[in-house]
Amino acid sequence: MNALRGQTHLFAASRRGMAAQKDVSGDTKGVESCQVESFLSDNCPPMGIYETLYAFRDSFGSFMGTEGTHPWSQGFPLTTPLEKFGGPSLPESIDVTWEDRFYPKAWGHPELRAAIVEYYNSQYSSKITPENVMVFAGGRPGIYTVMAFLKEHVQVRIGNIEWPAYLDIMEQTNTNFEVVPFTKENGFHPNNATYFDRAGLNPDTRLMPVISNPQNPSGQTRSGEELRELIQMAEQPGNGILLDEAYEMFHSPSVSAIEYVQDLDNSNVFIAAACTKGLQSPGIRIGWIVASKKNIETMANYSSFGMGGVSHPSQHYAVKLLEPSRVKKARKAVEQHYNWQRERYGKAFEDMGLGVHTGNGGFYHWLELPEGMTSAELNKRLFKRGAAILCASECDMSRPHSKDPNYVTPYSRFFRFSFGPLLPETFESDIQIFSEVFEEYRLDARDC
C-alpha cells in the first residue's frame, strides 16, 4: 500500500493548495476571497477517481491506502513478485553513470528502445525498428501527446464507458470526439464497424478510434480474428487507431495489435503501453508509443521543446524489466495470477446477486447493482468500512467535463471493482466486507 499512500498524500496536498492562496500582504485567504484572477484555465478538474479518493478521506478520516483500508477503486497492480505462479523478482537497483546525468535523448534511450523492439518482435512476430518507438514518462503522457497533435479534421471515436482520464485528455486538447454506445444489449463490446461508421460524415473527416484493450473498466477484450479485423479497418485510407494496451498481459494469451499490423509506416496506428501494469512498476513512470516513423518523428520533435526526454535511471530500470528471460516469466505469472483472481472474485459477486458483465481481460470487474440501488450510495456505505469502488459515472465519456451535478448518467447502477492491488490472502475479508455492506443496502432499498 506504500505507493498508493504516497500518491493520495500528494493529491490531497494539491487539493489543499487549490483551496488557499496568498494575497500580496502574505495573508492566506480562500480562493473565493482572492482578488487576483488566475491566469490558468478554470476547466481543469481532477480525474474522476481522485474525487472518490477525496470523498473517501472526508468520510473515513484517513487516506485510501493506509492500514485498514481496502483499495477496490484503485487501478494499480501488485508491485511484489507473484511467487505463487513463478513470477520473477523485481530489480532492486540500477547503476547510474556520469553519462546518465546528461540530458536524455528526445525519443528515448537507445537501450530501452531496442529492448521494446525486441519484446514486440519476439512475442508477436512484428518487424518494428527503434525508429517506431517513442518513450514517455508513463503511458498517459504518450496518449496526451497523440491527442494534442491531432489535425482538426480527425475525429476520435470512443466508447461510452472507458478509462476516466480519456475524457479529461480530450477536453484539454480540444479533441473532436464522438461517443460509441456501450450497453447491456451489445455486451459493453460494440462491434468493430461501429467505430468506423461514416454515415453522415464529411468525406474529408478522418476517423481514429481510441480503445483500451483489454478494456478499462470492463475487461472486454478484442483478440484473435476480431482484433485482426479491427486493425485491417484502422489501416484503410482515412482511418487510424489509438490502442491503449496497458493491460496487454492480463489476458490469456497476452494480446497486442502489433501482431496484426501490416504496414505500420504507412498507417496512423498508434499503440500505447507502459511498465505500469504487466511489468508491475507504476512508480518508475515509463511508457511508450509504437507508431510510424513519421509520427514518431513528430512526437520526438515535441519532446525536444515540450518534454525534454525521460529520466535515464527510470529507463535503465525498464530495460531490466524487459530482459527476455525475465519478461517471459512475468507474462506467464501475471496471466495466471490475475485469471485466478478474476475467476474467484467474479463467482463471489455472482453468488451475491450482482450482474457481472466482465470480459476475460484486465484486473477489474464490471458490475451491476439490482434495480433501486446506485453505486454512489453503495460507495458512501463502503466508505464507512474503509473501502471504495469506482462509480461508473466517472467512466462515462458523455458526462459534462465540468462535472455538472444535474447530469444523470445512464450507468448509475454500475461500478468498477479492482482486484489489481489485492493480496491473495485478503480475498475472504474483501468479500465479507463487501457482502455485508451490499446486503444491508439491498434490504434498505427494498424497504423504501
Image: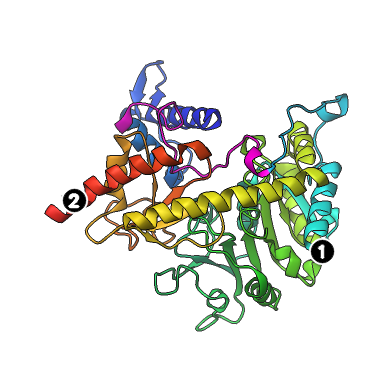
Above or below: residue 296 compared with residue 204: above
Residue annotated with mark 1: 125
Q: Main secondary structure of the magenta part?
A: loop
**Which amino acid type corresponds to the residue marked 1 in the rendered image?**
Ser
Query: Type of residue at label 2?
Result: Leu
Numbered disc 2: secondary structure: helix
In the picture of the structure, the residue carrying the numbered disc 2 is 443
Between residues 310 and 327, which one lies in front from this camera angle?
327
Q: In terms of secondary structure, where does tag 1 sit?
A: loop
Q: Residue furthest top?
A: 26
Q: Is residue 340 left or right of residue 105?
A: left
Residue 151 image position (x, y, % from top left): 63, 64
Q: Is residue 33 visible?
A: yes
* Image: magenta residue range: 59-85
Residue drawn at x 35%, y 41% as measured from the top left: 432
Q: Which mark is residue 49?
A: none
**Residue 398 spot, x, y in % from top left:** 41, 62
Q: Quadrant of residue 357?
A: bottom left
